[in-house]
Image (cartoon, rainbow, N blue to C red):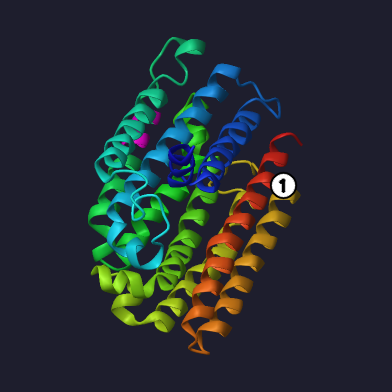
Amino acid sequence: MHKFSAWFRIIRPPIIIISCLGALVGVLNVSAHINDGIIRISFFQLFMVIIGATFLSAGLMIHNDVTDLKSDRINRPYKPLPSKKIKVKTAQTMGIILMILSIVISLLVNINDTGLLNWRCGILTLSIFIVGITYNYYGKYHGIFGNILVAYGVGSIPYWGAVAVAPEPQYLLVIMPLAFALFIQEIGREIMVNSGDYFGDLKAGFKTLPVLLGREKAMYIALIFYIVFIPIFPISYFGWLGSEKVFGNIYLIGGSIYAAALISTWVLTYKVVIKRDEKKIWRAFELYERTGTRVMVIFFQIMLLFEAFL
């Protein structure tokens, strides 16, 4: 039972939920756009998308915990690896296996419907795999470059779902503004998460942006990315490059609420940071930047799923 609980925790279920919902946003909205508002996706495709997103996300999260071990021993000693509930080599092997399986699944996502391999989805999955591994081993030591690597994976989630079902590359244009907007805000969010992990990362030797510049300066840079997100996300509402708009009023409302939540969590966290009480700072980052923003991401994704059926 303890082993099951440890494996359940190490795959980070909230991240898997976000990954699956994000992929379904791409699948359902692009499919509805292609088929004039009628969603024509087989249960096999939906199953493969959900399993593929789950395996890719779980594999990356497990592998991330392996490379985060030095920092987690300080920041989160209760996690499965630092508490030795799961062996490091076992976790490392399982993470790689799950990511490889996700590539295979992405290649086969349409095999039951078209009889063809989806090479575009397979290559995109491979790129996310490579970028994720690069971040885990290299990005943590190179400031904002590491945040960009993580943001690439997050921004790719809805695009990955679209690639899984779109028959022609031109249909993918409709999802690109959303993917880019998520990419931009995630750079800011990752900087904020690094700011919360400041002391553990410092002792572990990670060269994150807060370690290089200081926590407060890094937070201001994060705020810039949050603000830049605001004029970018409506592009999917108004349409671009001659493409019809794929999202409507629900998207605009959901995106606006999400943007307001990003700014609000930043303000709430910053108010605690300037008081210089490390225990309260830690709690603030955990509450607002980890839990709070994750909840709002799920809220935004649910709003986008509603769009597919309207």
Q: Is residue 260 left or right of residue 80?
A: right
Question: Which residue: 59% across, 40% down?
Answer: 21
Q: Quadrant of residue 17?
A: top right
The crowd level at tag 1 (other Cα within 10 Å; few <14, some 14-19, many 20+) is some
Q: Is residue 135 left or right of residue 185?
A: left
- Taking the view exactly as shown, the residue that stands out farthest to the bottom is 275
Asked if the magenta segment contains residue 123, the reply would be yes
Quadrant for the C terminus in the image:
top right
Q: Position of residue 72 (x, y in %)?
A: 35, 61
Please tell me whether residue 289 is drawn above or below residue 166 in the rendered image.
below
Q: Position of residue 226 (x, y in %)?
A: 53, 68
Residue 166 visible: no
Magenta-tinted stretch: 121-126
Q: Position of residue 174 (x, y in %)?
A: 55, 41
Q: Quadrant of residue 60?
A: top left
Question: Which residue: 48% across, 53% down?
Answer: 180
Q: The residue under label 1 is which amino acid type? A: Gly
Which of 229 and 222 lies nearest the eye of the viewer? 222
Please tell me whether residue 140 is drawn above or below residue 213 in the rendered image.
above
Q: Is residue 240 left or right of residue 251?
A: left
Q: Position of residue 290 (x, y in %)?
A: 53, 62
The residue that mark 1 highlights is 248
Residue 159 visible: yes
Magenta stretch: dominant secondary structure? helix
Which of 250 and 295 lies nearest the eye of the viewer? 295
Asked if the magenta segment contains residue 65, the reply would be no
Give the tally of numbered discs: 1
Secondary structure beneath dot 1 equals loop
Question: Which residue: 40% across, 80% down?
Answer: 215
Which of 186 and 238 lies nearest the eye of the viewer? 186
